Amino acid sequence: MSTAIVMPKLGMTMKEGTIVEWLKQPGESVSEGEGVAVISSEKLTSEVEAPTDGVLLTIIEEVDNEVEVGKPIGIIGNEKEAESESSQDVREGKDAALEENAPARQEAEVKGEDTNKRIRISPAARKLAQQLRVDTQNVKGTGPNNRITRRDIQAFADKRGEEKVPTKPKVEQETKTIVQPDVQTTGVKSEKLSVMRQTIAKRMQQSLSTTAQLTLHRKAEINALLDFQKDIKKQVTESELDVRLTLTVLIARAVTLSLRDKSFMNTHLIDGQLYLFDEVHLGIATSLDAGLVVPVVKNAERLPLGELAKAISSVTEKARNGQLPGYELTGSTFTISNLGQQGIEYFTPVLNTPETGILGVGTFIEELTLENETVKTVKKLPLSLTFDHQVLDGAPAGDFLNRVVYYLEHPYLLVL
């Protein structure tokens, strides 16, 4: 009996995933729970595990294909099975479902085909064929069971001498001619974006195109906060606390308390529905050599200052070592992004959708101020709050940011 390997749902908002790599090839043995493929989704890259012991019989979806959650990507059977009838049924059922959902023009083409010559083609390849106006009946597939892949479509179009992208209206063509520089033949190299960079690019584009983002800026006086930090270090050594009480930790605590007080910011907007959370799952943007990830501290509102420090240290360390499990990369309700170490003061952090807000933290600066006819040096922390104007107006967003500042300027409240 054959078993389908399906595209898993890795997060609340995940609708589809991209095949990054197949770790097994047809004919190779697999064990239940063993990784057979690598996929990327909105926020992470993860392995797909074999649902049972057996042999990988068929790869249904090629590398770079985008596949809906729950759809089959491969077939596992027993060692004696070749291409079993059940696996054939799964694939044909998938093809039929894709054809039902295809545009009317595509349906007409399918109906016109000889039913004895069913064309096996991946969804991504079919889409590219439509864009490049390639007749799939003339393309020879190089995938499993002569399945047509994106590479086959692109190769056919290249050979035919057509453009790799659909023809644009004349006005758009003229615009592209103006803004695009001539391609040099020397001194230039091209390279494909890494899987992580492609995922980040897709996420950023999706975030900016589906939300109404606005950023508010203000400063918080942190002299008292820095004194508070020094006082704790005097009273409790880092060995006793078992973690460093960094400025990021103190800011995270202030944000968590503010989300408790101003819960309208602790929300998700998904398909026109607003979800309000009682629990705070705090995302901590973490920079890696390969790109940016956002590990999540779950139930941050339940953690006192010391435990919050340990939790942040744990998830960021695992992220840097590539040991972060998928569940600690999803489900955040609010995110903090700190560029203070880079010397940045203000910036416009991009929303980690479907969240309503993200707080950007800059490097603290010193300013001179006049107090009781005396010039004093005051340390101030630049803060940048980006919020979704679809969910909130400027006034409540400003209330939230002011609340964060209040906690930072009254640091002993952070231990309550």
Image (cartoon, rainbow, N blue to C red):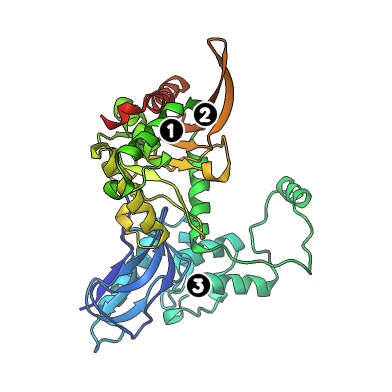
First reached walking from the N terminus: tag 3 or tag 2: 3
Looking at numbered disc 3 in the image, what kind of residue is underneath it? Thr
| Label 3–label 1 contact, CB within 8 A | no
The residue at 38%/73% (across/down) is 60
Location of the C terminus (image quadrant): top left
The numbered dot on residue 380 is none
- What is the count of numbered marks? 3
First reached walking from the N terminus: tag 2 or tag 1: 1
- Percent coordinates x, y for residue 103 in the rendering: 47, 55
The numbered dot on residue 226 is 1
The residue at 58%/42% (across/down) is 343
- Percent coordinates x, y for residue 106 in the rendering: 49, 60
Viewer-nearest of discs 3 and 1: 1
The residue at 73%/45% (across/down) is 171
Looking at numbered disc 1 in the image, what kind of residue is underneath it? Leu
Which secondary structure, mark 2? strand
Residue 333: quadrant of the picture? top left
Which residue in the structure is indicated by mark 2? 379
Residue 270 appears in the figure: no
Looking at numbered disc 2 in the image, what kind of residue is underneath it? Lys
Which residue in the structure is indicated by mark 3? 149
| Label 2–label 1 contact, CB within 8 A | yes
Give the vertical position of 332 relative to 16 (above or below): above
Neighbor class of circle 2 (other Cα within 10 Å; few <14, some 14-19, many 20+) is some
Neighbor class of circle 1 (other Cα within 10 Å; few <14, some 14-19, many 20+) is some
The residue at 42%/27% (across/down) is 224
Q: How far apart in space, not on screen, are marks 3 and 1 (Cα)?
A: 59 Å
Looking at the image, the residue that sits furthest to the left is 1
**Left or right of residue 299: residue 168:** right
Q: How far apart in space, not on screen, are marks 3 and 2 (Cα)?
A: 59 Å
Give the vertical position of 401 relative to 289 (above or below): above
Viewer-closest of 195 and 66: 195
